[in-house]
Image (cartoon, helix red, strand yellow):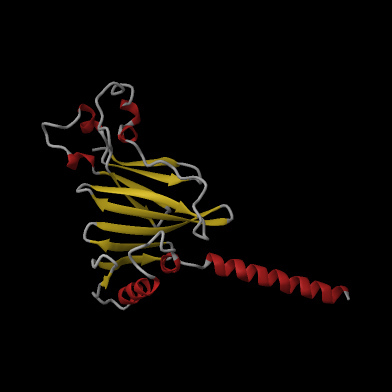
């Protein structure tokens, strides 16, 4: 009897492990196709499946979205998919493993006309994640060793930032596109001191800077 119970317990454990493994095996493309309409209102599920199929077969074919624009998949990896939604809008769906759950980062970038991004985090069931961190501010692009010197400098009231996910290490790159918004005569004093880019990680609560890849 004990042997039978042990076998049953082992089989049950194997089934649970297999189910967990299948959940973790879901790729960014899977989440892209399964995303609710509230997240991807311009593309229904069949359109998304077509886009993935075209991309994987190396076809240049685009898919017409609900605004009659042209959409297509630009790149795909296990944990990230890049999509051109229209001429002026693009989207990334990226997967992050935090604790016992998969967190989905949806990065939307629009030309305003300066490229500007927003990031929304979801749980694996597409419910909003409890922590929605703020995007970097203009002051975050000031080198740390100059912040005291520039604490009273005029800074741009709004920072325009293009965000992207780095599928190789799970970090986020934030590119400062604010300079493109100004002419030489209208630029705030602190604009010249802002770094071109910063790299950060999401720790489940906030973005934390990890590198300073470009100080220009």
Q: Position of residue 75 (x, y in %)?
A: 32, 65
Q: Quadrant of residue 210?
A: top left
Q: Nearer the viewer, residue 205 or 131?
A: 131
Between 27 and 46, the one lying in front of the other is 46
Residue 175 drawn at (x, y percent) = 28, 45
Task: Quarter of the image for the N terminus: give it.
Answer: bottom right
Write the residue at 19% across / 39% down: 179
Please provide percent x and percent y for residue 211. 37, 42
Residue furthest toward the right? 1
For the point 40% across and 44% down, which residue is it? Answer: 200
Q: Quadrant of the C terminus?
A: top left
In the rendered image, residue 110, in percent from the top left (x then y), is placed at: 26, 52
- Give the vertical position of 53 relative to 69 (above or below): below
At x 72% / y 74%, what residue is drawn?
A: 11
Tell whether 124 sits left or right of 44. Answer: right
Relative to 134, 154 lies left or right: left
Query: In the figure, is residue 116 to the left or right of 93?
Result: left
Give the camera-side residue of 46 and 160.
46
Residue 17 image-quadrant placement? bottom right
The answer to whether 216 is drawn above or below residue 76 in the figure is above
């Amino acid at each position: 009897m004990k042997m039978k119970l042990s076998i049953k317990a082992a089989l049950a454990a194997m089934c649970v492990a297999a189910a967990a493994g299948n959940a973790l095996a879901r790729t960014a493309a899977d989440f892209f196709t399964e995303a609710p309409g509230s997240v991807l209102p311009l593309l229904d599920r069949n359109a998304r499946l077509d886009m993935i199929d075209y991309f994987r077969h190396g076809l240049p074919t685009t898919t017409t979205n609900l605004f009659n624009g042209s959409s297509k998949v630009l790149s795909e990896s296990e944990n990230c998919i890049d999509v051109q939604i229209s001429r002026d809008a693009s989207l990334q769906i990226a997967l992050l493993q935090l604790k016992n759950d998969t967190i989905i980062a949806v990065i939307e970038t629009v030309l305003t006309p300066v490229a500007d991004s927003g990031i929304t985090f979801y749980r694996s069931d597409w419910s909003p994640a409890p922590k929605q961190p703020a995007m970097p501010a203009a002051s975050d692009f000031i080198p740390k060793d100059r912040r005291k010197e520039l604490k009273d400098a005029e800074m741009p009231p709004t920072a325009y930032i293009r965000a992207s996910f780095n599928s190789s290490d799970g970090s986020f790159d934030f590119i400062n596109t604010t300079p493109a918004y100004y002419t030489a005569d209208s630029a705030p004093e602190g604009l010249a001191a802002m770094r071109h880019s910063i790299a950060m990680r999401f720790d489940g609560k906030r973005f934390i800077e990890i590198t300073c890849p470009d100080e220009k």
